[in-house]
Image (spheres, rainbow, N blue to C red):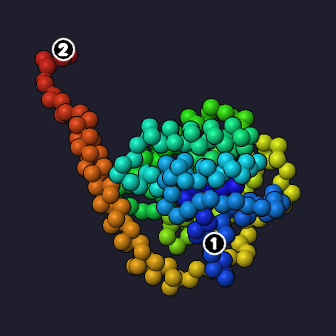
Amino acid sequence: MTLGDSTAVGLGDPLPGGGWRGFPMLLRDALGASTLLNLGCTGARMSWVRDDQLPGALTASPDVAVLSVGMNDTLRSDFDPRQLHDDCAAIVGALRAEGTYVLMVRYHDHTRVFRLPAPLRRALYRRIVALNAVIDAVAATDPAGIGVLDLDLLPGGYERSAWSVDRLHPSERGHRMLAAGFAELLFDAGFTVPHPVSLECAGGREVTAVQRTAWLVVKGVPWLARRGRDLGPVIVQSLVGELVRRPAPVAIRRGPAPDC
């Protein structure tokens, strides 16, 4: 089972006939599972997963659940680490109470993948650090029942080939890397993984240079403008905070000449 946002949906790994595959289907095939319930939806935030996706997950009582959510929260002006922790703890706690093994994501520094203006980059980086602190705190409550995939340590995770045209979602190769990472965590936890995930791209739809350019013009620039407006107050607060924290210049006073 998968809960979460557009990465959980599979965005970035398009199929030739339409729709998305992504790491959930690749992981399902690796495990040899006959069914996959993917509750992910584009734009989902942690609170949405708790309110809208968790009830369906609990009804299904899955053996394994992957929770991939949080980055959308970092891109909104109402980002609240405390509320994020409460929602994440409630989701994971409820799944663990059903006996479900939970896989979570610890996020990479996305400012190394998606280039942003410096003030926006600093604001987003601090948000990601706070999000990871939430993930760490929740995972620490039940180490035997929760596996965490650290994307910052994922080999090749910062390479261009791991990212789709928008540089916001994994490419087919990126989704394969995620699926392989999750499969390794499950194997270490005692699950059987009969079909290891290959990192060789196959079965997806190739994205051309023309499509990359079209995305940048039609969607990329407008997205950046929206996020800039949404995080504008955060950027201003950040700049003011840096000025306040900056130490005042210290005047240098000349003392008596030393004895020679």
Q: Position of residue 190 (x, y in %)?
A: 82, 43
Q: Earlier in the sequence, mark 2 or mark 1?
A: 1
- Mark 2 to mark 1: distance in Å? 79 Å
For the N terminus, the quadrant is: bottom right
Closer to the camera: disc 2 or disc 1?
1
Q: Quadrant of residue 217?
A: bottom left
| Of 198 and 229, the residue lying toward us | 229
- Residue at 73% across, 64% down: 26
- Residue at 73% across, 48% down: 61
- Residue at 18% across, 14% down: 259
Q: Label for residue 126?
A: none
Q: Position of residue 235 (x, y in %)?
A: 29, 51
Q: Position of residue 163 (x, y in %)?
A: 56, 66
Name the residue tied to disc 2: 259
Q: Give the amino acid type for the residue marked by disc 1 in the picture.
A: Trp
| Of 226 and 35, the residue lying toward us | 35
Q: Give the amino acid type for the residue marked by disc 2 in the picture.
A: Asp
Q: Say left or right for 256 vs 214.
A: left
Q: Residues within 10 Å of mark 1 (few under 14, many from 20)?
A: some
Q: Position of residue 123 (x, y in %)?
A: 36, 50
> Element type at marker 1?
loop
Taking the view exactly as shown, the residue that stands out farthest to the bottom is 210
In this view of the protein, can residue 155 be seen by the observer?
Answer: no
Q: Say left or right for 181 vs 171.
A: right
Q: How many marks?
A: 2
Name the residue tied to disc 1: 20
| Of 120 and 148, the residue lying toward us | 148
Q: Say left or right for 122 vs 1.
A: left
> Element type at marker 2?
loop
